Image (cartoon, coloured by chain):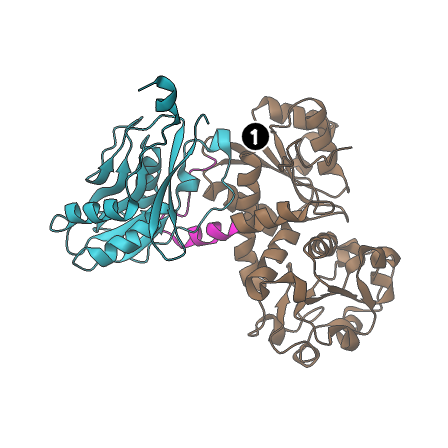
Amino acid sequence: MTRKADEATPVALPDAEQTLASLADRMRGAVAFDAKFVGIYSGGAWLAERLAQMIPGEHPVGYIDVSFYRDDFGSKGLKPEVKRTALPFDVEGATIVLVDDVLYTGRSVRAAINELFDFGRPARVELAVLVDRGGRELPVEATYTGARLAVARDLSIVLSRLADGRLALAAEGGHA
Amino acid sequence: MRNPQLDAAGNLTHLLTLEGLPAEVIVRILDTAVPFVSIAERDVKKVPLLRGRSVFNLFFENSTRTRTTFEIAAKRLSADVINLNIGASSTSKGETLLDTIDNLVAMNADMFVVRHSQSGAPHLIAAHLNRTRRAHVHVVNAGDGRHAHPTQGLLDLFTIRHYKQDFRRLRVAIVGDVLHSRVARSLIHGLTTLGTPEVRAIGPKTLLPTAVRTLGVQVHHDMHAGLQGCDVVVMLRLQSERMRGALLPSAGEYFKHYGLTPEKLALAKPDAIVMHPGPMNRGVEIDSAVADGARSVILPQVTFGIAVRMAVLSLLAGSAG
């Protein structure tokens, strides 16, 4: 096993659909029957819709775009396509499960919690993530995790939705 | 020479006029405004985007609506807003415009929203900031003389897009005092840039500048012919305070020929929308039955105006300058 061969090996990413199934397994029986699922755009939004179908109970789905609450606005400005935050239920007193694709620094989750509280005071907020890649910069932990991964800092893990609706994980960037 | 509104990478650093602004910059502003519309429907009508930034409203000319909507927009972005009633202060003591600006920059202003009766005043301020390497302080033109009112033009474009989607199939009529109207000029530039095939200017000869055809619009002096088949009818306010000399016989005579009544509106398409930048002169350029009617989108324009100004302020604040 040479160093060179090791570098050429692509990151082994788990299958997104299988990971989603294990995340759903962990949530079943643990998530409140009336918990509201809030997906963080864009990957989290797809996952929240899928999980609402997979987890028993009544789980209305809402969406959050954290662009207006990010802490890097001063250095990065607004991203090109800001989506509309839509929470079609009362946040006040509700049990909310935030759903995101990749948990990394924890900054998006911080922003999402701040935004959530501008709609009301939830009774409880949980966090479900497809992939936890470590590297936290804030004291944020997921309540439910599909898979844990160790990847180089310069790689982005991106969830995409294929034409047939299936989800897929890919690594982007890094040193070629 | 570079467009003074854009930085080297093509990002907006000042908003002075829609003239010469690339279509993608205009579309980016309109797209950014969409999610801001819904913030008004929240419990907490505020997002923390401009927290800690200072927006100075510099109104050298009176305005209630524009100043208020800029103030609301900045406050909903959590900025600190300072309103200066310049007419009553420094300038009357003899301070030059640029000295006033330098003093306010020394007070750590991040953004100036400027209205001035002199065309080009906001441009002068922006050029001064660019020249002195302080382009991180942004300038928004809130109306200068007869020149431009870009945020009004943008909110008009946003409203048209909201109701009619695609500009490339539209026939838009702008009716009235085009001669004195910076609103009309900004809207015409925006519509043209976004590919609107037919823009008509309708009004008496005395209120339509001879050069208006060079902006790519069709000129009509007969309102009946002009309104035929239009998708959008934009009524302009008769700016009597700006009129020098007798351009019109009387307000009543004007209403008879160019006032928008239900009968005249019937000449436009059945689903045509009616817009007005406000403040309205009922019974002069528009009949109450139209202003309060089902096809009027005059109040939605005001609501959208806040979201559009939030988008402009955010995009400017997010650019390095």
Residue closer to the observer: A104 or A161? A161
Q: Is residue B38 magenta?
A: yes
The single residue placed furthest to the left in the displayed view is A29
Residue closer to the observer: A19 or A4? A4
Q: Identify which residue is drawn at 52% across, 56% down.
A: B303
The single residue placed furthest to the top in the displayed view is A3
Q: Identify which residue is drawn at 53% across, 34% down.
A: B318
Q: In the figure, is residue B162 to the left or right of A26? A: right
Shade of chain B as shown in the rendered figure: brown
The single residue placed furthest to the front in the displayed view is A1
- Give x and y (percent) for residue B315: 55, 39
Q: Check disc 1: other Cα within 10 Å, few if <14, some if 14-19, many if 20+.
A: many
Q: In the figure, is residue B313 to the left or right of B22? A: left
- Amino acid found under the numbered disc labelled 1: Asp
Q: Which of the chains bears the disc numbered 1?
A: B
Tally of numbered tags: 1
Q: Is residue A109 above or below residue B244?
A: above
Residue closer to the observer: B101 or B208? B208
Can residue B129 be seen here? The reply is yes
Residue closer to the observer: B20 or B200? B20
Q: In the figure, is residue A59 to the left or right of B205? A: left
- Give x and y (percent) for residue B240: 76, 59
Quadrant in which the N terminus of chain B appears: top right
| Residue named by callout 1 | B110
Quadrant in which the C terminus of chain B appears: top right
Q: Identify which residue is drawn at 74% across, 33% down.
A: B2
**SS for dot 1:** loop
- The region drawn magenta spans B33-50
- Give x and y (percent) for residue A28: 14, 51
Q: Does the magenta stretch include residue A88?
A: no
Chain rendered cyan: A
Can residue A119 be seen here? The reply is no
